[in-house]
Image (spheres, grey):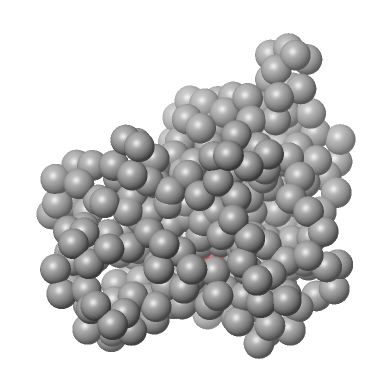
Amino acid sequence: MIGSRRLIGHVRASARYPTYVIPLRQLRLTKSYKTPFMAPIPRTPLHQAIRCLSTATPSTSALEAAKHAASLRAVQTHYHPSMRYVGIGSGSTIAHVVSALSSLPSGAANTTFIPTGFQSRQLLLSAGLRVSAIDEVPPYAVDVAFDGADEVDPYRNCIKGGGACLLLEKLISPALGTTYTRGIPIEILSISLPYVLAGLKGLNLQPELRMGGSAKAGPCITDNGNFVVDAKFPAGYKGCAEDEAKRLDCSENVMQLAKVLNGIVGVVEHGLFSQVDKKPEVVYFGMQDGQVQVLGPNCPGK
Ligand SMILES: O=C[C@H](O)[C@H](O)[C@H](O)COP(=O)(O)O
């Protein structure tokens, strides 16, 4: 499956376990959970994510166990020692993927891993795995990419970028959701901030510059030296589809929004991984009961 990628996901620590995954439009209006994924590849891409089924806030250990189970399943299903290049996303779920890869009985001596940021590079190096950079391998040479996701909808559209690593993740992975509490992460050129904010407000989104938090005065700076703006969906947001018919198709709606975001000058990349921008082929959800659920091409969405 040329052009697709693989992805694995899980519910984030601060998230609530949803009872189901619903389309982006509805999710962002009604739910408050995050679903990470990981995933996959260049020629045979696929993404996987993890989902939990309860409204209770999961304990950290239950969450980590769910991430681990989904990661293990994804690696066992989609990694093969003969693979030459494998993309590795960023975030907490990826630590479980790297752990699963480094403990494979077959080893991974023939594979070079392509990280999407400082954190995943350090993880790979610490695990003794061979690392290279996206600009040191031929385009589209990645066999599969594993990554986490913040949210995933039934169509396998994803929101990513909670860790500000969306740009390189989109490069390695061909691959939305809910009420992503911070909105869609958008990496931008710092000098374009006023224009990007105006453009996003014009779409009726509620943009906010992400700050560095207690560890850094001023804005969050990505691995590429850029700013990140989180664009929230206001209550009752109907998307930016040109007509009602398109709004009826959630996947179409997401694709349209992705295209519009790409058209704003100053936007380097956004965290929507949709049909247009590399949505995952397969998503693995870690469940509270230890099971792993799979959302693939033959599942309800598409
Ligand atoms: O920028 C970060 C990435 O998109 C992460 O894959 C995403 O935020 C999920 O992260 P985590 O695995 O920590 O839930």
Q: Quadrant location of residue 299?
A: top right
The answer to whether residue 109 is visible is yes
Q: Position of residue 24 (x, y in %)?
A: 71, 41
Q: From the image, which quarter does the C terminus lie in?
A: top right
The answer to whether residue 220 is visible is no
Using residue 109 as the reference point, say whether residue 190 is left or right of it. Answer: right
Nearer to me, 214 or 143? 143
From this view, report whether residue 115 is shown above or below residue 67. Answer: above
Nearer to me, 107 or 113? 107
Using residue 261 as the reference point, say whether residue 43 is left or right of it. Answer: left
Q: From the image, which quarter does the N terminus lie in?
A: top left
The residue that appears at 79% across and 60% down in the rendered structure is: 18
Q: Quadrant location of residue 266?
A: top left
The residue that appears at 15% across and 74% down in the rendered structure is: 109
The residue that appears at 78% across and 53% down in the rendered structure is: 20
Nearer to me, 66 or 292? 292
Q: Position of residue 106 (x, y in %)?
A: 24, 78
Q: Position of residue 287 (x, y in %)?
A: 69, 70
The residue that appears at 14% across and 51% down in the rendered structure is: 137
